[in-house]
Image (spheres, rainbow, N blue to C red):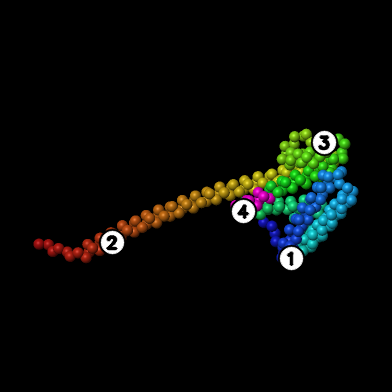
Amino acid sequence: MAEPMGDKYDAYAQKTDAPMAALALIFLCVWSGRIIFFHSLPGGVRATMLTVQGVIWAIFLADLIVRTIISKKSWRFLWTHPIDVIAVLVPAARPLKVLTAFTQATAFATAKGRMKTMQAVVLSVVLLLWIGSVAVLAAEREVTDSAINTFGDALWWAFVTVTTVGYGDFSPVSVEGRVIAVLMMLVGIALIGVVTASVAAWFVALTSGADEQEDEAREVTRHEEVQARIAELEGKIDRLTAALEKSEDSPTRNPQ
């Protein structure tokens, strides 16, 4: 369960989380468009896109500083909120905050929680594939020996990398591309592990809950049987008592 961050932080987060998510989506679209359509965009458009990216990056940096200052954890906030730090380095990764759904203790406890968690899983995978594809394309497209030259190639590579299949038909050859590949594999493995562990915990909880319900039902049945037995014994005792009282009240015959 997450530690309380303070009333000021909660109020600030409530007001800024949605706008910051929107800015992250804008950054992701601008960054992706600049990389994917780099050669077909006029120089002025590319410069404008870079300016937009720079402004959004500055906003995310200011947001991180404000959150760090007003949180109860002070500078420990940076260590305990890695996605916020990553969002400053790569603002396009900001939407990955949906992964915090897994940190909720009740994520799989209710049908609504399970639905929200599954939505977080799907969105996280889509974002991971999107970000990884664009990043590796930017790193590999200008490399002579690289086979990743189009966004389609990059997307296929990202998919087989995240799923740890690794067909090998496309592989990065630059240092930047290989670093991105390592990060993609680590995040993919971690995401799969978290989902698997969460689902397993949910099934264990369901099984335990079913066993507890069966035990409770058996206890109720035994209790009802005992109560019925006691009532039967009480009835017999009442009849015997009534018979004894009747025999005592009847007149005694005198011998002839």
Q: Main secondary structure of the magenta part?
A: helix
Q: Residue at x 86, y 44 (%)?
A: 40
Label 3 amino acid?
Ala
Residue indicated by mark 1: 8
Q: Is 113 in the magenta?
A: yes
Label 4 amino acid?
Lys
Relative placement, left or right, of 148 versus 231 is: right
Label 2 amino acid?
Thr
Decide: few, some or many residues near mark 4? Use Cα within 10 Å; few <14, some 14-19, many ≥20.
few
* Inter-mark Cα distance, 1 to 4: 29 Å
Q: For the residues labelled 3 and 1, say whether their Cβ atoms are less than 8 Å apart.
A: no
* Inter-mark Cα distance, 4 to 2: 61 Å
The segment highlighted magenta reads 111-120
On residue 112, the disc is 4
Q: Secondary structure at mark 4?
A: helix
On residue 241, the disc is 2
Q: Secondary structure at mark 3?
A: loop
* Inter-mark Cα distance, 3 to 4: 44 Å
